[in-house]
Image (cartoon, rainbow, N blue to C red):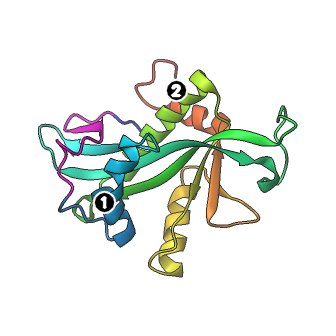
């Protein structure tokens, strides 16, 4: 699941340079996030948004948004070893992964997810991070929700027992995926 592709680039979102007006992933909320909220949230240091563009083009083909947070271990089935007494552990929240309809089915979602994994490894090595956590959106009904959760499960994410919409992947698993990736010097 490499992030290197000769014709594509992943860049931090720059609203002055990246064109988002015609972006349409098929989910109104995710389209609006990119068009209306991403710039402000990034400017206010609430999130970082990364976009996939074709080399030399400003048109956004897909994006993901990440931010840091904490979660209480009471949400997990078992308490991870070494958890502080206060019960809160550091996590990376994956806010969204979205690919323009015209690009869906070409592997861009996997490229974006692997980019999230690489960022999570850097964060974990720099400041500590126990897992990646996300909330799968239910927009579009049960069938679409099942399709989304199945996609996340294909990367190793598991649902919380107490909340099937909330999913997580431990850094141990994330590192294993990154280490096994083609082109990884440590693989």
Q: In the image, is 61 to the left or to the right of 88?
A: left
Say which residue appears at 47% left-offset and 40% top-offset.
116
Q: Tell me if mark 1 has few (under 14), some (14-19) or many (20+) residues whose alpha carbon lies within 10 angstroms of its own.
A: few
Mark yes or no: residue 67 visible: yes
Look at 34% across and 71% down and name the residue there: 28
Task: State which quadrant residue 175 falls in.
Answer: top right
Q: Find out whether residue 7 is within the magenta segment.
A: yes
Q: Main secondary structure of the magenta part?
A: loop
Q: Which mark is residue 36?
A: 1
Q: Position of residue 65 (x, y in %)?
A: 42, 48
Given residues 86 and 164, the one toward you in this image is: 86
Q: CA distance from mark 2 to mark 1?
A: 28 Å
Q: Secondary structure at mark 1?
A: helix
Query: In the image, is residue 41 part of the stretch drawn in magenta?
Result: no
Circle 2/circle 1 CB separation < 8 Å: no
Quadrant assignment, res 9: top left
Give the quadrant of the N terminus.
Answer: top left
Q: Quadrant of residue 136?
A: bottom right
**Pair 2/1: label in front:** 1
Characterize the local packing of mark 2: few (<14), some (14-19) or many (20 or more) Cα atoms within 10 angstroms: few
Residue named by callout 2:
122
Q: Is residue 60 above or below residue 184?
A: below
Residue 135 placement (x, y as % from top left): 57, 60
| Magenta range | 4-20
Q: What residue occupies the far front of the structure in this picture?
A: 44
Give percent across and percent down for residue 180. 53, 31
Q: Earlier in the sequence, mark 2 or mark 1?
A: 1
């Amino acid at each position: 699941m490499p992030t290197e592709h000769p014709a594509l680039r992943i860049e931090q979102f720059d609203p002055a340079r990246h064109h988002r007006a015609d972006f349409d992933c098929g989910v109104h909320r995710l389209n609006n996030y990119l068009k209306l909220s991403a710039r402000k949230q990034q400017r206010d240091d609430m999130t970082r948004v990364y976009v996939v563009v074709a080399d030399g083009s400003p048109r956004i083909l897909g994006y993901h948004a990440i931010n840091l947070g904490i979660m209480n271990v009471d949400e997990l089935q078992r308490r991870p070893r070494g958890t502080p007494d206060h019960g809160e552990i550091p996590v990376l929240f994956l806010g969204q992964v979205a690919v323009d309809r015209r690009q869906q089915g070409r592997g861009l979602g996997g490229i974006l997810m692997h980019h999230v994994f690489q960022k999570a490894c850097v964060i974990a090595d720099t400041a500590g991070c126990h897992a990646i956590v996300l909330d799968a959106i239910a927009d579009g009904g049960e069938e679409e929700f099942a399709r989304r959760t199945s996609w996340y499960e294909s990367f190793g994410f598991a649902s919380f027992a107490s909340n099937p919409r909330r999913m997580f992947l431990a850094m141990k698993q994330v590192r294993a995926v990154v280490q096994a990736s083609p082109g990884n010097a440590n693989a």
